[in-house]
Amino acid sequence: SAVISQKPSRDICQRGTSLTIQCQVDSQVTMMFWYRQQPGQSLTLIATANQGSEATYESGFVIDKFPISRPNLTFSTLTVSNMSPEDSSIYLCSVGVWVLHYEQYFGPGTRLTVT
Amino acid sequence: DQQVKQNSPSLSVQEGRISILNCDYTNSMFDYFLWYKKYPAEGPTFLISISSIKDKNEDGRFTVFLNKSAKHLSLHIVPSQPGDSAVYFCAASGGGANSKLTFGKGITLSVRP
């Protein structure tokens, strides 16, 4: 398994500002993902961030709004830029691991409220 | 268009009885399915998975059944315990290099003592 920590756990931010969320994994992993869970909704994949390559964004998400860094195999950051109240969500970091089968492990999430 | 559907938003069962959580999918390319449990203020926790080459996978009190022809899977929890009360997400993957997951909206399970 993989143990994932995220910072901050929660934040309240003003409209127009940016927040960078950090994700730290206790082991080296190639595949890392960033998800968003809006209130009452499912988890939606924002982007895949594999070390050594540019992040791949899903439809509806762009790099200017959600820049991602992946400097090594244990760490990644997601920035939510120029925030609006619609960005209020839980943001989750996840890693993909192949053991006997494929599993994805999730961090505890960052609860963001934009006022 | 929701590719993974959990049509029942909630389920309430008595402690000791069976909980059956259902999930339907529309994308025939999905070949790997996972169930997650989520408590408030925590990230989802992996429970059990099943590959499309199987129709059943068991792990302790948790069993997942897959009916490929119906594009339907279900999670059975026997016996249900109060600590099982949580939101359960079904997720699907088409496999491949990035194995990204598509999630359903979740089912809130309440197990009554």
Image (spheres, rainbow, N blue to C red):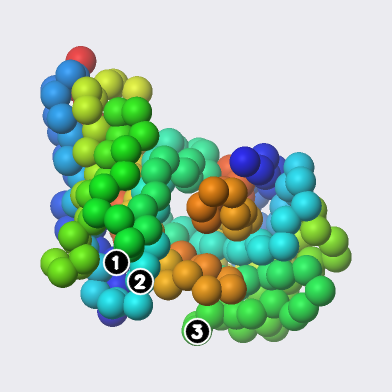
Q: Position of residue B28 (x, y in %)?
A: 28, 77
* Three-letter code for the amino acid on which mark 3 is drawn: Ser
Q: Nearer the viewer, mark 3 or mark 1?
A: 1
Choose between A76 and A82: the one closer to the eye: A76
Disc 3 vs disc 1: Cβ atoms closer than 8 Å? Answer: no
A34 with respect to A41 (left or right): right
Per the image, the residue denoted by label 3 is A59
Instruction: Quadrant for the N terminus of chain B, please.
Output: bottom left
Q: Is there any visible trace of residue A113 in the rendered image?
A: no
Q: Residues within 10 Å of mark 1 (few under 14, many from 20)?
A: many
Residue at mark 2 to residue at mark 3: CA–CA distance: 19 Å
Per the image, the residue denoted by label 1 is B4
Q: Position of residue A9 (x, y in %)?
A: 65, 43
Per the image, the residue denoted by label 2 is B30
Q: What is the chain identity of the residue bearing mark 1?
A: B
Q: Position of residue B76 (x, y in %)?
A: 22, 38
Residue drawn at the location 81% of the way across and 74% of the way down: A52
Q: What is the chain identity of the residue bearing mark 3?
A: A
